[in-house]
Every structure is written in C-alpha cells, then in structure tokens.
Image: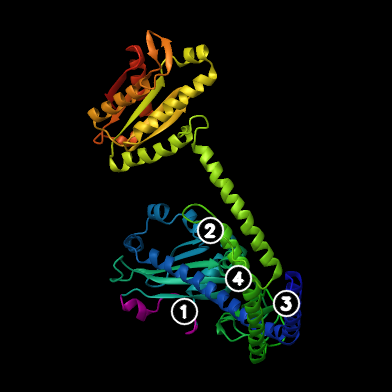
Amino acid sequence: MTLKRFSLLLLSSLLLTITMLLVSIYYFFYLPGIKAEVLDQQQQEYNLLHSALSLSKNSLATLCYDYAVWDELVEYISNPTDDFVQNNMPDNAFEAANIDAVFVSDINNQLMWDYQDASLKSSRSSLIHLFHQQKTRSFAILPTAAEIASQTVSSRSGYLVFDGALIYFSNTTILPSTGHGEIAGSLTMVRIVDKALINDISQFSLVKFSIEDAQTSTKNTQEFFSLKKIETIAPSHNWLIRNTFDDQVVQVTLHHKKVSLPQLDWASAISILLSIVLIVSLSLMALSRLLIKPLIRFNKSINDSSDDNFISKMASNHFIDELENVSYSFNQLLLKFNAQQNYLETLTVQDSLTGITNRRGLEAFTKRIIARWHLENVGFSVMMIDVDNFKYFNDKQGHLKGDYALTAVATSLLEVMAQYDGLAARYGGEEFCIILADNNHQNILNVAEEIRESIEKLHISNNIDDRDWLTVSIGVVVVDDKLADVEKYNFSDVLQHADEQLYLAKQAGRNTAKVTKFGD
C-alpha cells in the first residue's frame, strides 16, 4: 500500500466521522447548552456589579474612618479655627478623593462645618436636612445618644437616592486617634455615583451598567440588593434602589454581553464526547503505528548525532512503501555525506603543502590550551620558528625547492615533537608555531636547540651569510603556571612575546633560539 492511498483512506474516514459527530453535537447539544452557560454568566455579572458597588461604598467608609478618628479633628470641634480647615480640610483633597460632600457635626448633631462640590451647591440646604433628620428608625445617619454615650467608635453607611441620583454616605463618630475616649461629634462623607464613577466601576468589574432616575410606579421591579437569582436570559436586567423613608428611587440597568438558546443535555453530550474521543484515539493509534512513528524516527535520525558527529542511519523496514524507499535513499546519501565530511574536515585543519596542522587547526588547539590556563592555571610554552633568509633561498633556487624545503622542515618538526606533548603547525609562509604543555625553562630551551640542530642537519644547501645549510631562528616564551590575573591575557599576548624573541634571535645572527618568561 502506498503512502498516498493509505493517508487518503484513513483521513477520509476520520474526517467523515468527525464531521457527522460535530453536526450532531451542534444541533442537538451545543445550541441547547448555551442557555445554561449564558444564564450563569449573566448571574455572575450581576454578582460582580453588586460586589463592585459594595467595595466602592466600603472605600468611602474607610476614608471617613481615617478622618474621623483623629486628634486634630477632636480639637477642632472644641476650638474651631479657619487655619485647621485651610491646612487639613482643603477642597482639592476631597476632589482628588472623589468626595462630593463632607459634614462635621458636634455631639448634639449640630452642623459645624461642611464642604460640598460645586454640583451640589444648589441642593446644600436640602442635603443638610436629609442628613440631619431623625424621623424614622429605619433611617439614621448621625449617631444616636446611645452610640455617643458608648464612647467608642461607631459607623453608619449605606445608599441613598437624592435628586434622582444614587449616593453613598458614611458617618463615623469623631474620637481621638486611639479609637477610644470622649466622642466629640461625627463626620459624614458623601459620594455621588455619577457617570465618571459608573465608568470606573464598569472598568473595575468588567460589566456595563447605568443608573437612571425612575418612577415609584415600577413596583414589580426587584430591589438591587436583594441578590435574587436571575431566572431568564435577557439583553439587560433592571433593579431598583429606593429610600426607606420617601418615594425617591433610581433604576440600575445591567447590560449583558451575551444572549443564548435552550439548555444542554449533559448526559448525551458526555456520551457523544466519549465516542469522539474513542474514535479519534483509535484512529491516531493506527496512524501513529503505521506512519507517524516511522516519520518521527526518521526526523530523529536526521537531528541526532553521535559522538563522532556522524548522523545515525535510519531503519529501512517499513509497512509504507514510500517510507522504505526514502529510508534506503537516505542511508545511501548518508554514506556519501560522511565520506565527504571526513575529507572536508581533514582539509580544514591540514596544511595542503606540508601536511602538518595549519593555522585553523592551531587556533582550535590554542583555545583548549588557553582555557586550561585560565581555569586550571596550567602553564605552557610557545615557539615561533622562521626559516632564515627564505626569500633569498626561494628567489635563488626556485619555488619548487622552496616548497621542498618547507615540507622538509615541517617533517623534521613532527619528528622532534613526537617525543613531547605538543603541537607543531604551519603559521604561514615560512613561519611555524609549536605549542608545548611543558613550562620548564631549561626543558624548553633544550627542545628549541634540538629543533634548531635537526633543521641544520637536513643539509639543505643554502649559501647565504657564510652558511652552507638552511637554518631557522626560534623565539620562545614560557608561560608560568602561577602567573597572577591570567584571565586578562589571551593567546595573542603570548604570541606577541614569542614574535619579539624571534626578532631578537634574528638580530643575534639567526640560527639561534631566544627564550623568555611571559610577563618579563
């Protein structure tokens, strides 16, 4: 069976089954199920709005308490002064706190000082009368004689309808800052639930609502604070907030986000859902066994590499013909790729002329050496070797003999370094570089002399500077394993010292080695 036929057969069956199930769920379960969900959402919106209004009122009560339990305010009632009002009760402070009216009364509930927002100036006398009336037991804003006699802090707060608007009020007995002592009077604060505050509450509660003046004839509408459960779904629901002592009333309208359809049969929905899960699970198991798992293994073979950086082969026995063909082709291509990669990796670190390590390989080796130097304080040595008068040798005897000479020098370096723990590399042109793990000054000097003598013993003819044979000059730097602050140095710093010693060796007449300690 081909992959195309297998995929079409399996996916067509799965698609047909899922389509039939989805259509059944949509018409028989999804549409009825929206009703319960949206009804619950509308109830939650009502609960959120109720909580948001309560929290907004409670914040006013907290602010009123903070002002009322205050030593300076107690003193003001016994000795009223304009300075206290100007310094401690400025209008802009109440405006910033969204307080629309403040009333300070003595223990006889006589008004001593008040503040009202500009929007309430025309209603000042009626608002004062409203807050100081004590006509009904169900409505009392100012403290009673019994509450004053208790000599402890007491508060009263709630909602009122005033001039067609909903207002919060909070009243707290004025006491010293300790919260106990002789009551001096009471403090009343008022906040109007205006459009700005409604917008703030809407953003806080994430529900959209409005408050409008209403007529008392709407007696069938429920009270907002009754918290009765919403029974029907509607675009909006209305509640009333009314005073307990007069006919003033406002209507709270909550605008819902969703409206929906009949109720969901959960037993049937669960049965359909389990059927879908079973069918899809069986289909996926078959698809995974025959197609997905082989593809995953194929992908893993490409992404994973072994320790020697060769990609692993792919299993070639598959049920799907195309997969078996692809795996075979991949394995054949992998063999060719690995062979080519080995060849290319060799070229990247091997000098094409001399066959020894080139500068790229040297740089990779020095990274490990410098890392050990920085992390473990392991010393080492570096030699820079230059073939003496090689330009004249090349010009006089030709480039072919020059290449032969360089190859012979490189071979000699490898033979000497075979006895030591180090690396010999062609740095460029007629320059070579040697890195040794040893940092003993005398040992390194002996190695340098051995190298110099081995090159001279090659007996490569070179009649320059009264010498019969080709020679080399060597600059050596020994890096101490106890050097302080090694982290601030890198290989280029060490190499610069080696170059300086090489220059001194040439100045001294060539065919010699100069050794120094790094940092000297």
* Residue type, numbered disc 1: Ala
* Residue type, numbered disc 2: Asp
| Quadrant of the rendered image containing residue 269 | bottom right
| Quadrant of the rendered image containing residue 175 | bottom left
Choose the circle earlier in sequence order: 4 or 2.
4
Magenta segment, prevailing SS (helix, strand or loop): loop
The Cα atoms of the two marked residues, 3 and 2, are separated by 30 Å
User: Label 4, on which residue?
Assistant: 293
Verify CB contact (< 8 Å) between mark 1 and mark 3: no
Where residue 455 appears, as percent x and y from the top left, is: 37, 23
The Cα atoms of the two marked residues, 3 and 4, are separated by 16 Å
The Cα atoms of the two marked residues, 1 and 4, are separated by 78 Å
User: Label 3, on which residue?
Assistant: 10
Verify CB contact (< 8 Å) between mark 3 and mark 2: no
* Residue type, numbered disc 4: Lys
**Dot 3, crowdedness within 10 Å: few (<14), some or many (≥20)?**
some
The answer to which of 67 and 148 lies nearer the viewer is 67
Please name the colour scheme applied to the rendered image.
rainbow
